[in-house]
Image: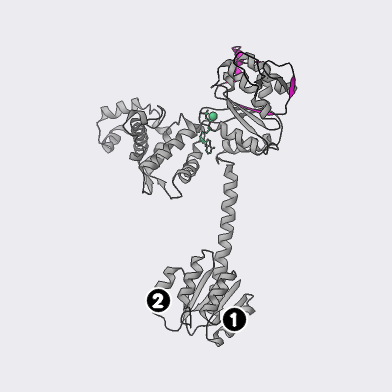
Amino acid sequence: MRVLLVDDERTVTRTLGDSLEENGHDVTCAYNGDDASKLISEELFDCVISDIRMPGLNGIEILKQVKEKQNDTEVILITAYATVEQAVETIKIGAFDYITKPFMNDEVIMLLKKIEEIKTLKHENSNLKEKLNEKFTLDKLVGKSKKMQEVFELIRVIAKTESSVLITGESGTGKELVANAIHHNSSRKNNSFIKLSCAVFPEGLLEDELFGHVKGAFTDAKQAKKGRFYLADKGSVFLDDIDDMSLHTQVKLLRVLQEKEFEMLGSTKTIKVDVRVIAATKRDLLELVSKGLFREDLYYRLNVVPLLLPPLRKHKEDIALLTNHFIMKYGKGKKIDLSHEVEVIFMEYDWPGNIRELENTIERALVFAKDKEKIFLKDLYLPDTEEEIPNNKSLLLKDVLNLYEKSHIRKVLKKTNGERNKTADILGINRKTLWEKIKYHNIDDVTNL
Ligand SMILES: Nc1ncnc2c1ncn2[C@@H]1O[C@H](COP(=O)(O)OP(=O)(O)OP(=O)(O)O)[C@@H](O)[C@H]1O
Ligand SMILES: [Mg+2]
């Protein structure tokens, strides 16, 4: 280790210095506080060993200076006049240890060994953490469940290819994030990534957006307009809600996929483009194909690599990880946990709005949980003014309480092996009420809990 040894007593620096060097450390000496201070600001040391009483800056001030720099240099202080108060103070400021004169050189060597071990551990730990993080994230996506890990793997593989992708998943499952990740991990990452939802444009307008028009193509076409495919040349186009595309536009899209060409509205000039199409849908496209609402040939063209995003209720193992991720995102770096009841609710709840709903729930809870270390049930309460309730899918108070009640009854039933009299006693309700609640919550096979 690189060690800075500071003492105005030259016999100390010489004998201790020699002994440290014999043990393989690289030692620099300073004979007063001011020289030491200069060295600290200019060089990097793993450890500073300093006397407390010296001419100029004293050892405590040196310790403060080292700690201010916030690097991981450790400080060992030495003094001939030890008092308990002083020892406590130095440790509080962040000294690694405190030695009194006279001391054996071996004492210092042992301390350095300890520091070295801790540094190695810290280093390994941060490497490990980084690796873990790397494994459980892909761009902005996080997930460690088998299902999500498979999705990540698929994204990595797909990204390297040129084929079209069809992402299918319920609302809020991360379709757009996945599309982003595919583009940003592909060789097209430095070219444009253009997103467009087919659901927001009425039939004719979507075509106009995608392919553009020349001046005079229709009554209002006072100027030529470039379409998204033109602008996305060499890049990727994300077509969200592809199920909303009309059959007419589907024909044109198919041609872009097959021939890599199209014409602007009102023009006969063929334009060549090189775009990768990533499409997304919430619906079962094959079902639409069978109803004649989606072209079969386009379906197979798009669905070269199907990417199915599971609903959150099918990978609840990720809830804790996602929760932490969103707490980090919205909690301004504060460490905040979920209270036990909220953990239970999060695991019991079905999350019809999937990861987006979890994200919104946490963002809102953090507003209510201001200045706290935990999110409690009541922080999930929604404001009572109607317009502030964002959608009917959020965790409404009554749903939360219902879920909690169900979970609690199940837990007690499990404890009593399904004995209803005992359960009702523990819950402080009568048998009839218990029976009604079991029926209401659909708790059937308690032996199977
Ligand atoms: N695996 C994930 N890790 C972290 N955040 C995620 C993940 N999946 C989704 N999110 C977050 O959830 C929200 C919804 O994601 P996204 O918009 O990609 O979903 P979507 O499937 O496109 O939803 P919709 O169908 O409603 O358009 C976003 O804020 C996104 O950041
Ligand atoms: Mg989306």
**345 to the left or right of 250:** left
Check disc 2 and give the amino acid type: Gln
- Other residues around mark 1 within 10 Å, as few (<14) / some (14–19) / many (≥20): many
Expressed as whole percent of the image width and height from the top left, the position of residue 425 reads: 26, 36
The front one of 83 and 427 is: 83
Indicate whether 115 appears above or below 338.
below
Q: Earlier in the sequence, mark 1 or mark 2?
A: 1
- Residue at the spot of label 2: 86
Expressed as whole percent of the image width and height from the top left, the position of residue 279 reads: 62, 26
* Magenta stretch encompasses residue 408: no
- Residue at the spot of label 1: 17
Indicate whether 167 appears above or below 374.
above
Numbered range of the magenta stretch: 268-296
Check disc 1 and give the amino acid type: Gly
Indicate whether 347 appears above or below 123.
above
Residue 45 in sight from this viewpoint: no
Residue 435 in sight from this viewpoint: yes
Q: Secondary structure at mark 1?
A: helix
